[in-house]
Amino acid sequence: METLQFRFEQGARSLVGMPQLVGVVGSGNLEVLIEPAALGGACEIEVRTAAVGFGATWQAVMADFHERWGLADARICINDMGATPAVVSLRLDQAVESLTGGTP
């Protein structure tokens, strides 16, 4: 297992509502827990993944996600069992849509 940490500053979109859990950890999938948190306008993302050595890929997917959504005061925890970047993006979008009621 590998744990990766990402932090993006100066987000503009806040979350509303209760924490949300999207997806199921299982063969080739992942779960995303997203919740509002007082982070001074930042978005923190922790990834726990079984696919060791893909830090650069995770960085690219998380940077793309932040560029699309620009979340502020959000904490995201991802538990991954080998999902593809497309599935990661889909699950992140589902989680954010449930707390913002919108699209990027």
Image (cartoon, rainbow, N blue to C red):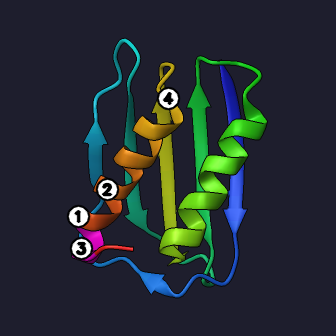
Image side of residue 85 versus residue 53, left or right: left
Magenta range is 98-102
Q: Nearer the viewer, mark 3 or mark 2?
A: 2
User: Which residue corresponds to the image point at 70% horizontal and 62% vertical from the top-left?
Assistant: 7
Q: Are marks 3 and 2 in contact (CB under 8 Å)?
A: no
Please tell me whether the stretch drawn in magenta is mainly helix, strand or loop.
helix
Query: SS class of the residue under badge 4?
Result: loop
Q: Are marks 1 and 2 in contact (CB under 8 Å)?
A: yes
Q: Nearer the viewer, mark 1 or mark 3?
A: 1
**Which residue matches tag 3?**
17
Q: Quadrant of the N terminus?
A: top right
Query: SS class of the residue under badge 2?
Result: helix
Query: SS class of the residue under badge 1?
Result: helix
Distance Cα–Cα, label 4 vs label 1:
22 Å
Distance Cα–Cα, label 1 vs label 3:
9 Å
User: Which residue corresponds to the image point at 39% horizontal and 74% vertical from the top-left?
Assistant: 104
Q: Is residue 18 above or below residue 28?
A: below
Quadrant in the rendering for residue 34: bottom left
**Which residue matches tag 2?**
95
User: Which residue corresponds to the image point at 36% horizontal and 57% vertical from the top-left?
Assistant: 93
Q: Nearer the viewer, mark 4 or mark 3?
A: 4
Under mark 4, the amino acid is Thr
Under mark 1, the amino acid is Ser
**Which residue matches tag 1?**
98
The outermost residue toward the bottom is: 12
**Which residue matches tag 4?**
84
Distance Cα–Cα, label 1 vs label 2:
5 Å
